[in-house]
Structure formats: structure tokens, C-alpha cells
Image: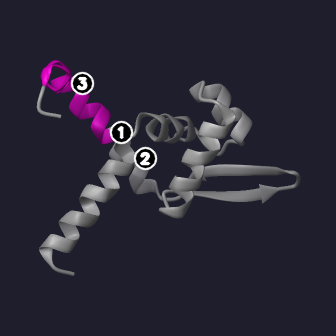
């Protein structure tokens, strides 16, 4: 894979994480697997909105689902995603004011 393709993939990955609703869902899943209803409660997103974003995250391989009896449980599919979110929190702890005041993006 050449450097341009790699950078395009990385930008696409971070763009997926940049959506506030998808990030809220991922943060809700940091504590472990949840049903759609539990994610809706944790994020305060509507059920249709939650389902649409979960579909996106599923298609991109960021979350996975597993049927357990009558319940479908969603969870983060790879430990690295949780690590990235936690690393971002560390950056924000140190640079939140600068990022908040940034007008470029």
C-alpha cells in the first residue's frame, strides 16, 4: 500500500470517529457490550439514529454484534479503537483549550 492510500484510509477512519453520535456510541461501548436499548439510554440518541450509526460502525468493522438468546449485543471489535479513544482523552486533558479555540476545523 502506498503512502497516499494509507493516508486516505487513516483520514477515512478518523472521519468515522469524528461524528459525535458514532463517538457517543463507541464511548458507551467502552464499558462493555450493550444492546441497542442500552446504547440509546447511555447516549440519549433516538433508536433509529442509533441503529443507523451502528450499521455504519458494523460495516466498517469498528463494532461487532453477537446474538445472545433474544438479545443482540454490540461491542467494540478491536481493542485498538478503545485505546485510540482513551489516548484522545489524554490529549484533550493537556490541550483542550487550544482545541476548543481552534477555528480551522
Query: Mark 1 sits on what residue?
Result: 86
The reply, left or right, for residue 43 in relation to residue 1 is: right
Q: What residue do we see at 37% from left, 41% from top? A: 85
Of the 4 image quadrants, the one containing the C terminus is: top left
The outermost residue toward the bottom is 1
Q: Position of residue 31 (x, y in %)?
A: 57, 37
The outermost residue toward the right is 70
Q: Nearer the viewer, residue 47 or 73?
A: 47
Magenta-colored span: 87-102
Query: Of helix, strand and loop, which one carries label 3?
Result: helix
Q: Which label was assigned to residue 82?
A: 2
Query: Of helix, strand and loop, which one carries label 1?
Result: helix
Q: Is residue 91 above or below residue 1?
A: above
User: Residue 29 falls in which quadrant of the image?
Assistant: top right
- Residue 1 drawn in magenta: no
Query: Mark 3 sits on what residue?
Result: 93
Q: Nearer the viewer, residue 39 or 51?
A: 51
Q: What residue do we see at 72% from left, 42% from top? A: 35
Q: Earlier in the sequence, mark 2 or mark 3?
A: 2
Say whether marks 2 and 1 touch (CB < 8 Å).
Answer: yes
- Colour option used: one colour
The reply, left or right, for residue 64 in relation to residue 90 is: right
Query: Of helix, strand and loop, which one carries label 2?
Result: helix
Q: Earlier in the sequence, mark 1 or mark 3?
A: 1
Q: What residue do we see at 65% from left, 50% from top? A: 74
Q: Is residue 79 above or below residue 47?
A: below
Amino acid at each position: 500500500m502506498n503512502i497516499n492510500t494509507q493516508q486516505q484510509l487513516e483520514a477515512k477512519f478518523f472521519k468515522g470517529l469524528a461524528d459525535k453520535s458514532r463517538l457517543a456510541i463507541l464511548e458507551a461501548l467502552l464499558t462493555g457490550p450493550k444492546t441497542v436499548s442500552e446504547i440509546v439510554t447511555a447516549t440519549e440518541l433516538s433508536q433509529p439514529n442509533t441503529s443507523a450509526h451502528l450499521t455504519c460502525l458494523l460495516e466498517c468493522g469498528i463494532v461487532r454484534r453477537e446474538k445472545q438468546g433474544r438479545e443482540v449485543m454490540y461491542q467494540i471489535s478491536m481493542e485498538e479503537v478503545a485505546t485510540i479513544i482513551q489516548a484522545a482523552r489524554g490529549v484533550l486533558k493537556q490541550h483542550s483549550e487550544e482545541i476548543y479555540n481552534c477555528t480551522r476545523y
